[in-house]
Image: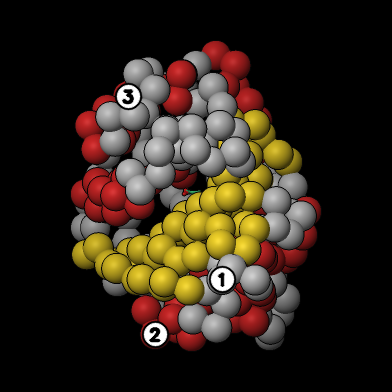
Amino acid sequence: MTRGRPGGVRHNRDADWDAWPVADYLAENYRELHPVDIGVIRHHSAFYRRFAPGSLARSLEFGAGPNLYPLMLAAAASRQIDALEPSSANVDYLRDQLARGPDDSWDAFHALCRRLDPALPGTPAEALARVRIVPGDADDVLAGSYDLASMNFVAESVTEDFTEAAALCAAFVRSVRPGGHLVASFMERMPTYRIGTGPAWPACPMDADVLRSVFAPLTDSLRIDRVAKDRTLPEYGDTGVLLLTARRPEGA
Ligand SMILES: C[S@@+](CC[C@H](N)C(=O)[O-])C[C@H]1O[C@@H](n2cnc3c(N)ncnc32)[C@H](O)[C@@H]1O
């Protein structure tokens, strides 16, 4: 439930992330492969194919939520993947999936990820074997501790305050060592959104120019791509998805 602040923008701390509606979120977004997932997975797979299998010691998934495919994508390149997540509801789901094995609905995601990156472990469970769940939020990340960080639908989806969204992007960049690698996706121009019939969650509409203004001063090799709006998803008010790759500058 979001508590909100009458008359003001809602900040990250104003939302009750422990009450994240995992089942409804999965039902709306991840129980089947949607066109937008195919676009994100194609983009991210091309990024991960740059790395030799097992060549990265530690990767971070920043605000993992209950989404397992970014964790699978990281598995070919990374020897350890930390899934950072503040919501107890999402942490419970991740723990359950690692303990019991991923729900069958993730098979299609794993199959596509492996088709595009054959170095991926052969089953969804094997692809998740390198994942360590880290309960916590952006403030808990030690700067420079990762070789690679991935962030999907977080900075623009967890606050209405642009300065705070930009600070989350900066924490994401800082999480990797100088020269470390970054991959991310963002809902494009998404206003406040609802999952199912639940409450409105805070969001901060961003477009490619805004993303560039946030990341260009902090990164090298910045590239921003886009996939078209997915009309098979519920209407979240977005205009598509923005895809980013970059590096933290050497010596930063
Ligand atoms: C829209 S969901 C995206 C989840 C997932 N990454 C995905 O691809 O579907 C936003 C996620 O950000 C997490 N989150 C909220 N505040 C955060 C913070 N300050 N630092 C890191 N993650 C946060 C939420 O708990 C939630 O899992």
For the point 22% across and 32% down, which residue is it? 115
Q: How is the image coloured?
A: secondary structure
Disc 2, SS: helix
Above or below, 205 relative to 32:
below
**Residue 6 drawn at (x, y percent):** 71, 79
Give the number of the disc on residue 47: none
Q: In which quarter of the image is the N terminus?
A: bottom right
Give the number of the disc on residue 107: 3
Above or below, 183 relative to 239:
above
Q: What residue type is labelled 1?
A: Pro
Q: Can residue 106 be seen in this view?
A: yes
Q: Judge from the rendering whether residue 89 lies leftward or rightward of residue 27; answer left or right.
A: right
**Residue 247 drawn at (x, y percent):** 50, 65
Q: Which of marks 1 and 2 is nearer the N terminus?
A: 2
Label 2 sits on residue: 209
* Label 2 lies in ligand 1 vicinity (Cβ under 8 Å): no
Disc 1, SS: loop
Give the number of the disc on residue 249: 1
Alpha carbons under labels 1 and 2: distance apart: 21 Å
For the point 65% across and 72% down, which residue is it? 252
Q: What residue type is labelled 2?
A: Asp
